[in-house]
Image: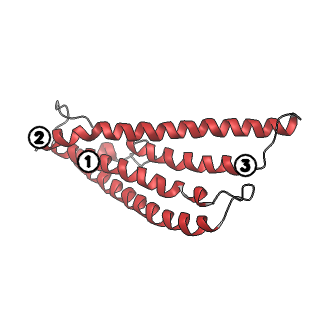
Amino acid sequence: MPSIFNTIDKVKPAYDVVYNFVLLVCKLLLIVDILITTMAVAGRYIPFIPDPAWSEEIVLTCMAYMAVLSAALAIRRNAHIRMTAFDRYLPKKVVTYLDILSDIAVFALAVVMIVVGWKYAAQIGGRGSYVSMPSVSKFWMYFPVPLAGIAMVIFEIEAIYNHIKKLFIKEGSINDEC
């Protein structure tokens, strides 16, 4: 059984690439947010700096992307808020099974985010446009939800795998990377 885990563990670099890419996107969105907000605020008080009408909508859209993508990143780091008060009183295997159960629930949520989020982005978002930029579809305002759902599915698959691996490989084993 451990040889199966060694084989599957070879996929870990692909998860690292996806994680680093999503993290890079979040960082770039934050930089864009800061620059646009700085320009908009400065444009209100300094006459020669423009205050574009589109700044607020773009900043809010970037924030929506950052919020949901960073939540997906937290799945991989196991950094979400969770109840662990009883973990030290329960057997480790029970805690691992409960972690798997919660991961399955989050996986289901991610699938709903993909399906319903795409439906909203395509139907509702496809019909409207930004007020300050009539040529840009509101699809991009709704698209962060299915995009984050895809990232969540990817990271939840890894989290579920790591928990299952923990059940079969003893702690302290050379092959244990959980």
Q: Is residue 35 above or below residue 161?
A: above
Seen from the viewer's position, the closer of residues 129 and 89 is 129
Disc 2 residue type (three-letter): Ser
Spot occupied by residue 25 in the image (x, y as percentages of width and height): 51, 40
Q: Name the N-terminal-most of marks 3 and 2.
A: 2
Q: Name which of mark 3 and mark 1 comes first in the sequence.
A: 3
Q: Quadrant of the C terminus?
A: top left
Residue at 60% from the left image edge and 38% from the top image edge? 30
| Displayed quadrant of residue 18 | top left
The nearer-to-camera label among 3 and 1 is 3
Q: Amino acid at mark 3?
A: Glu
38 horizontally vs 104: left or right: right
Coloring basis for residues: secondary structure
Write down the residue under mark 2: 3
When asked about the image quadrant of residue 176, the answer is: top left
The residue beneath circle 3 is 56
Using a 10 Å C-alpha cutoff, classify the residue at mark 2 as few (fewer than 14 neighbours), some (14 to 19) or many (20 or more): few
> On the image, numbered disc 1 is attached to which residue?
161
Residue most toward the front? Answer: 135
Of all residues, the one furthest to the right in this rendering is 47
Q: Secondary structure at mark 3?
A: helix
Residue drawn at the location 44% of the way across and 43% of the way down? 74
- Measured in 3D between alpha carbons, the distance from the residue under mark 1 to the one under mark 2, in whole angstroms, is 14 Å
Residue 8 location (% of width, % of height): 20, 43
163 or 90, nearer to the observer: 163
Q: Are marks 3 and 2 in contact (CB under 8 Å)?
A: no
